[in-house]
Image: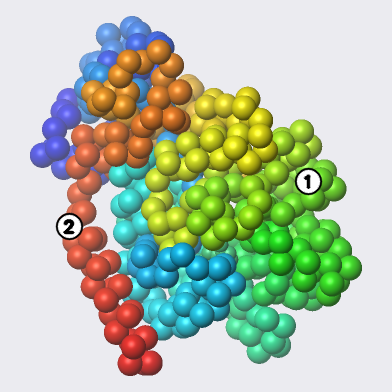
Amino acid sequence: MSACVHDPDLFTNKGSILITGTRIGDRNVDIFIDETGTIRDIGEGVSKKCRSEAEHQISAEKTLAIPGLVNAHTHAAMTLLRGYADDMHLQQWLSEKIWPLEAHLTGEDVYWGTKLACLEMIRSGTVAFNDMYFFMEDAARAVDESGIRGVLCHGFITFGLAEKFESEVKATENLVSHIRGMNNPRITPAVGPHAPYTVPPEHLEWCGSYSKDEDIMLHIHLSETEQEVIDCKKAHGVTPAVLLDQCGCLSERTLAAHGCWLEDEDCRLLAERGCHVAHNPVSNMKLATGRAMPYPSLRSAGVNVALATDGCSSNNNLDLFEEMKVAAIGQKFFWKQDTLLPAEEALSMATSCGAKALGIPGGSIVVGQAADIVLVSLDHPSMVPLHNPVSNLVYSASGCQVSTVLCNGRVLMYEKEIPGETAILSGAADAAAGLLNRAAQNT
Ligand SMILES: C[C@H]1O[C@@H](n2cnc3c(O)ncnc32)[C@H](O)[C@@H]1O
Ligand SMILES: [Zn+2]
C-alpha cells in the first residue's frame, strides 16, 4: 500500500484506493474505492475494514471531499486564445477577431489547446466537460490522455450554404464514429449546431433528427443576446427556443448554453421538453449580454440548470469555483432577490445538475457511484473558520485550494502534482504562438 508521488502506480492507478481522514460536509470519513473505480464504502470506520484490502492509500487530513465539478459548456481549445480579444461586443468579437483567427487552426493546435484546458480543469477540480469546437478527433485524443470525461461535438456552422452543410454533416458523422471507435467510456459524442443564427431551420432539422436517431446530446448556443431574439422573431416570427422546437431540436438530450434572453414561455417549453440549460455568468457579464439568465423562471418551470465557463476567450479561465460565486451573487444582484441561488444550489449546479445534463456518472459521493472526487485543502485562510463548508466553497474558495483529484477512481492530481504538466504548458504556448504567426502571414 502506498501514497507517494514517486509511486508511479498512484497515477496509473490500477487497483483499489483508500482515502483516509477527509470530511464530507461536517462528517469525518474514509472512502474506499474498488479497482473498477467505484465507491464501495464511506464512513468513519472504513479504514479499519478496508486497510488490508486497499492497494493504495491517500492520507487526506485537513481536506474536504466534494464531487468532481462538471463544466456544462465550453470550447476547450480556446485556451490558446486566452487574452487575445477582450472587452468587445459579442458579434464583433466573434466575426472580427475570433472566427478570422480560428480559420488558421490546425488539429495539432486543438490537441494542445485541449490538453491545456484539461490541465487547467483538473487543477481547479473539474472532472467532466461539454465541449463544442473544431478538429474534435484531436480534442478526443487530448481528453483520452487527460483522464477526465468529455462530451464532444463539432461546432456545426453553415450560414445556410449547401456545401457547408455537406461538410458539417460529414465532420459530425466522422466524429461520432471516431469516438465510438475509441471505446473509451469517459468520452461521448454529441451533435453541435452552433446557434439558430448560424444554422438555418432546414439544417437544424437534420441536427435534431441526428441527435434522436443516434441517441446523442444536442449542444447549442441559445438566446445569448437580445439581438439574436429580435432577429429570429423578424426572420421566423418566433423566439429562438420556439424555432428550435419547430425543428425537432428540443428534447431531454438537448443542452442549451446561455439562455440570457429566454422568455417565460420559452422556459416553460424547455421544461416541457426536458431540456437542460448551461449558465455561463462570467462570459455573459464580460460580453455584456445585458440580461442574466432568467434563473427564477427556469427554476420554477423545473428546468435542470447546470454551470459552465464558456471558452477561455470570454471568461478567461476554466475555474468553476469562480463561476459558482459569480452565479450565486450575480443572480441575486440582477433579479434583486437576496435569497435566490443559495450556496447549496450553486454547488449542485456545478456537480449533480451538470452530471445529469451530460448524462454521465458522478455528481455525488455515494456508495455505488463512480469515484469522481475532489479534495479541497482546508489548510488555507479562505477555508477558516469552517462554520459552513458549502458557504466557504462557493463564496470564499477558489480552484487553487484543490489539492487532489480523482476521476473514475483514477488519481489525476495528487497533492497538486500532475504528471506531464511542464510539457503541456510549453506545447500549448508553442501552439498559440504558431497560430498567431500563421494568421499574421495568412497561411
Ligand atoms: C464553436 C464556435 O463557437 C464560438 N463561440 C465561443 N464562444 C461563443 C459565444 O459566447 N457565443 C457564440 N459563439 C461562441 C467559438 O469561437 C467557435 O467558433
Ligand atoms: Zn460558447
Q: Position of residue 409 (x, y in %)?
A: 36, 35
Image check: 183 left or right of 165?
left
Q: Is mark 2 within 8 Å of ligand 1?
A: no
The residue under the point 63% across, 85% down is: 164
Q: Secondary structure at mark 2?
A: helix
The residue under the point 63% across, 55% down is: 290
Q: In front here: 411 or 295?
A: 295
Q: Amino acid at mark 2?
A: Thr
| Vertical order, 170 against 19 (above or below) | below
| Vertical order, 274 against 153 (above or below) | above
Where residue 439 sits, quadrant-wise, is bottom left
Q: In front here: 114 or 371?
A: 114
Q: Amino acid at mark 1?
A: Cys
Query: Which residue position is annotated with label 2?
Result: 422
Q: Check the picture and name the quadrant holding the C terminus.
A: bottom left
Q: Which mark is in front, 1 or 2?
A: 1
Image check: 38 left or right of 14?
right
Q: Position of residue 286 (x, y in %)?
A: 50, 56
The residue under the point 23% across, 23% down is: 379
The residue under the point 33% across, 60% down is: 115
Mark 1 touches mark 2? (CB < 8 Å): no
Query: Which residue position is annotated with label 1?
Result: 267
Q: In front here: 169 or 284?
A: 284
Q: Earlier in the sequence, mark 1 or mark 2?
A: 1
Is residue 207 visible from the viewing direction of this image? no
**Label 1 neighbour load within 10 Å: few <14, some 14-19, many 20+:** many
Is residue 386 visible from the viewing direction of this image? yes
Q: Position of residue 355 (x, y in %)?
A: 55, 40
Q: Position of residue 325 (x, y in %)?
A: 48, 36
